Amino acid sequence: MHSYISIRSPLLRSTILPLSLRRYITPRYNPTAVASLSISIPDSELSARGFSINYSTTNLDPSALNDVFASVGFPRRDTARLNLALSHSSGSLVWLSRTNEPTKPVAFARATGDGVFNAVVWDVVVDPSYQGIGLGKAVMERVIADLREKGIVNIALYAEPRVISFYRPLGFIPDPDGIKGMVYSRRNLQKKKR
């Protein structure tokens, strides 16, 4: 089961997104810390290490992205539907590729939302052969910074319990109020019909 992680402003405490999760998590809101979110690996260092930073789906090979999804245990997605989902990622999208393989992502994260108050981060993945060298943190820091620059203060995401510790240093914590999210799903409707 996935947990739900959120960065929320105290002014938006009543905002609850209807998402499936075991627990709903939110960070302690610290406007100074969030506003001064720094990038731990500068663009110049990523470039020196042989990585290109991409902020759009231009040149992104969806089949290669699907390969990364599968390599971390995410389900493969229908390519046409994946392309449609990516086209709706107007909140923020960041992916890293090797400089010598510019269409193949090695790290990826995207966010969708209303463009004003709320955003949900989706599909945070790092190819297993590139894990442990800061690339997940690099894409997440850039997604968060991009959303914060747009004035978005309610940033949420799903996280499996085993990766919650990855998100904590980025400002995400379990919701102290124990708020639970909910989801409307086809699976639940099918169970009801039986």
Image: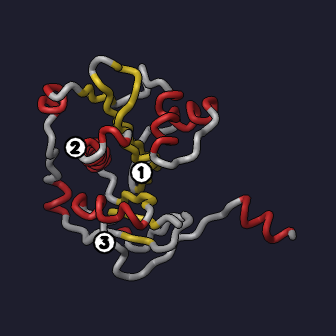
User: Which residue in the structure is indicated by mark 3?
Assistant: 10
Look at discs 1 and 2 and give the one toward the viewer: 2
Q: Are marks 1 and 2 in contact (CB under 8 Å)?
A: no
C-alpha separation, residue under disc 1 versus residue under disc 3:
20 Å
Q: Residue furthest bottom?
A: 177
Side of 148 where 193 appears, left or right: right
126 left or right of 193? Answer: left
- Extreme top residue here? 100
Which residue does the image show at 51% across and 73% down from the upper left?
22
Q: Amino acid at mark 2?
A: Ile
Q: Which residue is mark 1?
A: 121
- The amino acid type found where label 1 is placed reads Val
Q: Give residue 117's quadrant in the image.
A: bottom left
User: Mark 1 falls on what kind of element?
Assistant: strand
Image position, residue 81 (x, y; %): 63, 35
For marks 3 and 2 on the same chain, the one whose residue lies earlier in the sequence: 3
Q: Residue furthest front?
A: 129
In percent of width and height, residue 26 lies at: 35, 69
Question: Decide: marks 1, 3 in contact (CB < 8 A)?
Answer: no
Q: Check disc 3 and give the amino acid type.
A: Pro
The earlier-in-sequence mark between 1 and 3 is 3
